[in-house]
Image (spheres, helix red, strand yellow):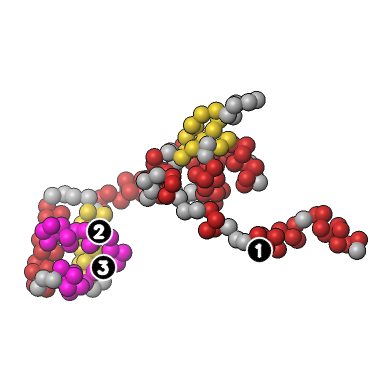
Amino acid sequence: MDTRALLEAMLFVAEEPIPAGELAEVLELPLNDVEAELGAFAQSLQQEGRGLVLRELGGGWRLFTHPDARAYLERFAASERNTRLSKAALETLAVVAYKQPVSRGQVSEIRGVDSERALHTLERRGLIAEVGTASGPGQAYLYGTTPLFLEKMGLRALGELPPLADHVPPADVVDALERPFRSEESSTDSRS
């Protein structure tokens, strides 16, 4: 890979300006060579009318989006597909991922609240889809995750999901947490 491509890759992932000296150290190249390449890279981005610009500021170099793209980027960032999922949608997505194929009623029962809106949001975003219908009365739609879900989660297959047991507290902890909410125990305790 040539020097410019390596610089582009490092600057692409940088969250703050990177000093030319640090880039030179990583690339094991003389500082003057790296500075010259950064200047040439910045100039070529400008001349080619690219969507990115390279600027030196704050003691280092950083890639930015071109200022003329701002209005489009604001619209893109505000689009439904790019907004964050709500807590309810994330909980619903977890239920579908681990229990699929699962009906709306089953999801709502597991979560303890109506999940229809969250399911519609996830379906609109392409993270879940109808994968069939349940046998029996009503023939409820069954939901499952999509290839986009796997892509967004960085998984090749559902088998790579972390085991649920890693995230569930021990039974005695669950019992202690639930005890104050059990009406039978509180009424039994008051009679003693």
Location of residue 16 by image quarter: bottom left
The residue at the point 24 percent across, 69 percent down is 18
Q: Mark 1 points at which residue?
A: 173
Task: Please identify the residue farthest to the right as the structure is shown.
Answer: 191
Predominant secondary structure, magenta span: helix
Q: Is label 1 in a helix, a strand or a loop?
A: helix
> Is mark 1 in CB contact (under 8 Å) with mark 2?
no
Above or below: residue 56 compared with residue 51: below
What residue sits right under mark 2 in the picture? Answer: 12
* Amino acid of disc 1: Val
Across and down, in percent, residue 15 comes to 31, 64
Nearer the camera: disc 3 or disc 1: 1
Is 46 contained in the magenta span? no
Q: Quadrant of the C terminus?
A: bottom right
Q: Mark 3 points at which residue?
A: 17
Give residue 96's position: percent from left, percent from top.
Answer: 52, 42
Mark 3 / mark 2, whichever is N-terminal: 2
Q: Which numbered disc flags the more N-terminal residue, 1 or 2? A: 2
Location of the N terminus (image quadrant): bottom left
What kind of element bears circle 3?
loop
Q: Is residue 72 above or below residue 23?
A: above
Q: Residue at (65%, 59%) from the top-left corner?
A: 171
- Residue 64 falls left or right of residue 33: right
Q: What residue lies at 19% left-to-right and 58% top-to-bottom? A: 8
Which of the 4 image quarters holds residue 140? Answer: top right
77 or 113, which is in the foreground? 113
Residue at figure coordinates x 40%, y 44% from the top left: 157
**In this picture, which residue range is highlighted in magenta?**
1-27
- Residue 35 can be seen, yes or no: no
